[in-house]
Amino acid sequence: ELMAHFDFPANVELMDAGTMGLSILDTLRDFDRLIVLDAAQGTGHEPGTVLLFTPAELAENQVLHSAHDMRLVDVLKAATMMDIVLKSCVIVGVQVQAITQWVLELSEPVEAAVPIACAAGLDQLKNLGVEPMLKEYVEPPAAILEALENFAPQDEEAPE
């Protein structure tokens, strides 16, 4: 969504890393700050809830897609061992509804949370002084723009 609707300064790169695991290490060499938008599970929040995490906080809530998958926190630890130093890393996580079958579609609550997660990512960029511009000749993303005005990611602590 962000790539489709916004242009970013040359010093900002957006990528769909999927489940690249350790293969993303070489890419991390080129960056000093990282903002990750990802799925989370087991947070105790309702499906579709958008939360902000540090890598350590995400570790126990990260979605593993297979037994061969690697958690982001493990990739970041490997990066540190290779002298790849990030000044900051924040994860925008969306609580998934269920991980019971392999599907490509998002559940309704997660689909509804996409604009909020995008707004949270844009807010994190704004905190770093980055102001993306809406792409010309593309219909403005009303849901993302509305979320930018109204969103408030929840703390990582689950409700009582």
Image (tube, rainbow, N blue to C red):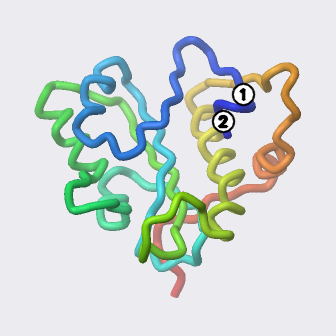
Residue occupying the far bottom of the picture = 160
* Amino acid at dot 2: Leu
Q: Is residue 143 above or below residue 94?
A: above
Residue 110 in which image quadrant: bottom right
The tag on residue 2 is 2
Picture coordinates of residue 22, whole percent (x, y): 22, 38
* Amino acid at dot 1: Phe
What is the CA distance from the residue labelled 1 to the residue labelled 2? 6 Å
Label 1 SS: strand
Compared across the picture, whether 58 is left or right of 84 comes to: right
Considering depth in this image, is 160 or 19 the residue closer to the camera?
Answer: 19
Pick the quarter of the image with the N terminus.
top right
Residue depicted at 37% across the width and 66% down the height:
61
Callout 2 crowding tier (Cα within 10 Å): few <14, some 14–19, many ≥20: some
Residue 125 in which image quadrant: top right
Picture coordinates of residue 116, whole percent (x, y): 69, 54
Picture coordinates of residue 112, whole percent (x, y): 71, 62
Picture coordinates of residue 127, whole percent (x, y): 59, 34
Q: Is residue 33 above or below residue 98?
A: above
Considering depth in this image, is 136 or 57 the residue closer to the camera?
Answer: 136
Question: Circle 1 sits on which residue?
Answer: 6
Residue depicted at 47% across the width and 52% down the height:
38
Callout 1 crowding tier (Cα within 10 Å): few <14, some 14–19, many ≥20: some
Residue occupying the far top of the picture = 10
The tag on residue 120 is none
The answer to whether the residues at label 1 and label 2 have Cβ atoms under 8 Å apart is yes
Residue occupying the far left of the picture = 81
Residue depicted at 46% across the width and 49% down the height:
91
